[in-house]
Image (tube, grey):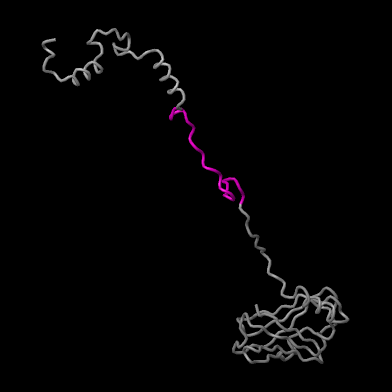
Amino acid sequence: MRAMIGIPLANIIVALFAHPAATGGGMGPAAAGHPPARCQAAAKTAASAQPSEAAAPAPTAPAATGAHKPGQAKHSVKVSPYRPDRFAGRAGSYYRLVWGVDSLAVKWGESGEVIRFTYRVLDADKAKVLNDKKNEPSLIDPQAGVKLVVPSLENVGQLRQSTTPENGKSYWMVFSNKGRPVKRGDHVAVVIGAFHADGLVVD
């Protein structure tokens, strides 16, 4: 007790509570550094209530709406290898019904020195005007401002077929394009008597 004289009372109280074993006050297991059973149970309950971070499943990102899947097939645009029919629809019907012909075509020939016009006969009766020798054919190119005619050669005559047309057969005639005023891609018209074919494209 003499040793404690001169030591502040507050320091003694703090020392007693910080080191209860030093007082020999019989604090039991808690004094030896072991928490009471009630404290151990509470600690276990609190520990079990908190989920382990390692065991927690990783969050999965929600699937994006409209996302493309690897195995999903992409829609592709089909391209036809065939050339479109320039006279499909009303134009094609007109030439077939009125003039009995189809498959009208205008092509460059002989390096552009001549233009070849071809057609197929479906109705020979209606198409006979195209083969009539009395009707002088002409090819008109408004863009170039020219009018081509079918040339005549000695011992051959006009470079055109003028025989009586037959169903299912194709016929041709050639126009002189001296100087190549008519170019590929030009829109031309072929006139043979009363027959008029407009909007033909030179291939």
Image quadrant assignment for residue 157: bottom right
Q: Which residues are magenta?
A: 51-73
Picture residue at 82% right of the left edge, 92% below the top:
134
Most prominent secondary structure in the magenta stretch?
loop
Quick check: 77 above or below 141? above
Picture residue at 56% right of the left edge, 46% below the top:
70
For the C terminus, the image quarter is: bottom right
Q: Nearer the viewer, residue 164 or 51?
A: 51
Say whether residue 59 is magenta.
yes
Q: Nearer the viewer, residue 155 or 71?
A: 71
Quick check: 167 above or below 148? above
Image quadrant assignment for residue 82: bottom right
For the N terminus, the image quarter is: top left
Picture residue at 30% right of the left edge, 10% below the top:
27
Q: Nearer the viewer, residue 18 or 46?
A: 18
Picture residue at 72% right of the left edge, 81% below the top:
117
Number of marks in the image?
Answer: 0
Percent coordinates x, y for residue 34 in the rendering: 33, 13
Q: Nearer the viewer, residue 175 or 72?
A: 72
Percent coordinates x, y for residue 102 in the rendering: 78, 76
Percent coordinates x, y for residue 188 in the rendering: 68, 85
Is residue 170 rendered to the left or right of residue 177?
Answer: right
Say whether residue 126 is magenta.
no
Is residue 111 rendered to the left or right of residue 5?
Answer: right
